[in-house]
Image: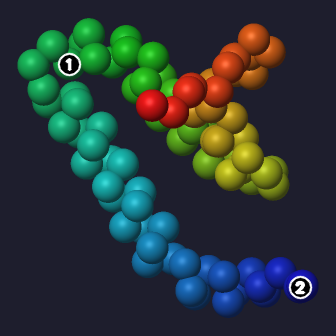
Amino acid sequence: MNPLPAEQALERYFLEARSKLLDIAAILDRIGRGENARTAELDPRVAKIRQALEVLNDPRSGRAERVQKIFSLDYEEAWERPKLS
């Protein structure tokens, strides 16, 4: 399977990307305007969002995988699958 030509990908996904980026900007604005905003800015989840935005700004490939790893839990060898009731 051949990848979509860059111009076609841009044409097809630009508005979707724009919309998602505006959503993220609005979320960060809400956090910044909220009560105790300085405390929230120190929350590790906000740090992960900011780290993911840095990855998105990096032109190297593999951005989706790198962002996924930011939000994934580390592998635990001793992890056990939850038992169904």
- In the drawing, does residue 32 fall left or right of residue 62? left
Question: Which residue is rendered at x = 43% and y = 24% of the image?
Answer: 45
Residue 35 horizontal/vertical position (percent):
9, 19
Question: Given the image, on which type of amino acid does mark 2 rest?
Answer: Asn
Scheme of image coloration: rainbow
Question: Which residue is rendered at x = 58% and y = 87% of the image?
Answer: 11
The quadrant the C terminus occupies is: top left
Q: Is residue 51 visible?
A: no
Total numbered circles? 2
How far apart are the two marked residues, 2 and 1, measured between alpha carbons? Answer: 46 Å
Q: Local crowd at mark 1 within 10 Å, few (<14), some, or many (≥20)?
A: some
Q: Are marks 2 and 1 in contact (CB under 8 Å)?
A: no
Q: Local crowd at mark 2 within 10 Å, few (<14), some, or many (≥20)?
A: few
What residue sits right under mark 1 in the picture?
Answer: 37
Asked whether 20 or 60 is in front, the reply is 20
Q: Secondary structure at mark 2?
A: loop
Where residue 2 is drawn, which disc sits there? 2
Asked whether 44 or 57 is in front, the reply is 44
Q: Is residue 71 visible?
A: yes
In the displayed structure, would residue 61 be above or below residue 19? above
Asked whether 68 or 81 is in front, the reply is 81
Question: Given the image, on which type of amino acid does mark 1 rest?
Answer: Ala
